[in-house]
Amino acid sequence: MSQNRFSPRAFTMPLAAFTMAGLLFVYTRSSIRMARQNAQMQREASRTRTSSSSSSEGGAE
């Protein structure tokens, strides 16, 4: 009475764990990349607002 050690049930949990780990990795990397892009856009917008407001103040006199 030998049992089959390599049944589909034996691979279900490891496959699910690796799938979840892969999804978490991809989500984390994309989230960090999007946060960096957002911060860069906000820095550029802040610089643009600062330079345009300082130049308009000087020309009003």
Image (cartoon, grey):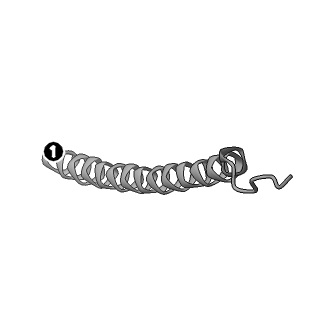
For image coordinates 71% across by 47% down, the residue present is 13
Check the image and report above or below for 43 versus 16.
Answer: below
Residue 36 in the image, given as x and y percentages of width and height: 42, 57
Q: Which residue is mark 1?
A: 61
User: Few, some or many C-alpha atoms within 10 Å of disc 1 (few <14, some 14-19, many ≥20)?
Assistant: few
Q: Is residue 29 left or right of residue 60?
A: right
Residue 52 in the image, given as x and y percentages of width and height: 21, 49
For image coordinates 36% across by 49% down, the residue present is 42
Q: Amino acid at mark 1?
A: Glu
Which is nearer the eye, 45 or 6?
A: 6
Residue 60 in the image, given as x and y percentages of width and height: 15, 42
For image coordinates 69% across by 55% down, the residue present is 6
Residue 22 in the image, given as x and y percentages of width and height: 54, 54
* Residue positioned most to the front: 1
Secondary-structure class at tag 1: loop
Question: What is the total number of numbered labels drawn onto the structure image?
Answer: 1
Q: Is residue 20 left or right of residue 32?
A: right
Q: Is residue 46 left or right of residue 35?
A: left
Which is nearer the eye, 20 or 34?
A: 20
Image quadrant occupied by the C terminus = top left
Q: Is residue 46 left or right of residue 31?
A: left
For image coordinates 25% across by 46% down, the residue present is 53
Which is nearer the eye, 42 or 61?
A: 42
